[in-house]
């Protein structure tokens, strides 16, 4: 393939990514939230069940019963999932996502014996929590488009806008 044909092909692929990347990101993250949230409706089905309940118990000073906490978390996560999948009420959905992410990382501090095997060495539970950095960052990227913004696949056009 010569250089000109490659550049044309590359431009088409990059354009497709720019045109559809945010919606695919939104839907894929939404599916993760919907799936993980749905698991929490049934006690013990989610691998994070015990840690999530212990965290909520500690954060609410034991005022929220376990069943209510589990169902509340399940409703929150599935609502975030539906909001992302269908692109409705995105500002509210992303606000809920940000709050949920803050709650998700608290076990790293509240339960270091469960989430850390040593200095800088997360346990499996800790890894489960740390992967949420990607979800939170995806939320930030999606949030950058709620006012109609989009990805720009053309470096010259991006330079005209003044952002890279």
Image (tube, rainbow, N blue to C red):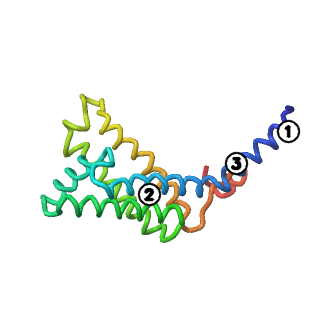
**Residue extending farthest left:** 62
Q: Could you say whether the residue bearing mark 2 is in a helix, strand or loop?
A: helix
Q: Could you say whether the residue bearing mark 3 is in a helix, strand or loop?
A: helix
Q: CA distance from mark 3 to mark 2?
A: 35 Å
Rendered image: mark on residue 34: 2
Q: Could you say whether the residue bearing mark 1 is in a helix, strand or loop?
A: helix
Residue 132 x %, y %: 39, 46
Q: CA distance from mark 2 to mark 1?
A: 41 Å
Q: What residue lies at 25% left-to-right and 34% top-to-bottom?
A: 116
Disc 3 designates what residue?
A: 155
Q: How dense is the environment of label 1, judged by Cα within 10 Å: few (below 14), some, or many (20 and up)? A: few
Q: Are marks 1 and 3 in contact (CB under 8 Å)?
A: no
Q: What residue lies at 53% left-to-right and 60% top-to-bottom?
A: 144
* For residue 92, side relative to residue 23 (left or right): left
Q: How dense is the environment of label 3, judged by Cα within 10 Å: few (below 14), some, or many (20 and up)? A: few
Q: How dense is the environment of label 2, judged by Cα within 10 Å: few (below 14), some, or many (20 and up)? A: many
- Tell us which disc is closer to us: 1 or 3: 1
Choose top left, top right, bottom left or bottom right for residue 5.
top right
Residue 99 x %, y %: 34, 60
Disc 1 designates what residue?
A: 5
- Tell us which disc is closer to us: 2 or 1: 2
Q: Nearer the viewer, residue 47 or 26?
A: 47
Q: Are marks 3 and 2 in contact (CB under 8 Å)?
A: no
Return the disc, 1 or 3, that comes first in the chain's sequence.
Answer: 1
* For residue 24, side relative to residue 67 (left or right): right
- Tell us which disc is closer to us: 3 or 2: 2
* For residue 67, side relative to residue 136 (left or right): left
Residue 160 x %, y %: 69, 56
Return the disc, 2 or 1, that comes first in the chain's sequence.
Answer: 1
Q: What residue lies at 29% left-to-right and 33% top-to-bottom?
A: 123
């Amino acid at each position: 393939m010569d250089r000109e044909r490659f550049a044309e092909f590359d431009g088409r692929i990059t354009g497709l990514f720019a045109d559809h990347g945010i919606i695919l990101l939104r839907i894929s993250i939404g599916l993760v939230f919907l799936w993980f949230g749905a698991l929490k409706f049934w006690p013990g089905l989610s691998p994070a069940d015990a840690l999530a309940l212990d965290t909520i118990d500690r954060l609410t000073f034991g005022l929220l019963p376990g069943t209510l906490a589990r169902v509340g978390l399940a409703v929150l996560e599935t609502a975030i999932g539906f909001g992302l999948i269908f692109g409705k009420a995105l500002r509210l959905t992303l606000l809920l996502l940000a709050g949920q992410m803050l709650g998700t990382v608290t076990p790293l501090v509240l339960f270091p014996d469960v989430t850390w095997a040593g200095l800088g060495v997360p346990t499996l539970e800790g890894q489960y929590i740390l992967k949420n950095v990607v979800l939170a960052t995806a939320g930030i990227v999606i949030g950058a488009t709620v006012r109609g913004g989009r990805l720009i696949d053309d470096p010259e056009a991006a330079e005209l806008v003044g952002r890279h």
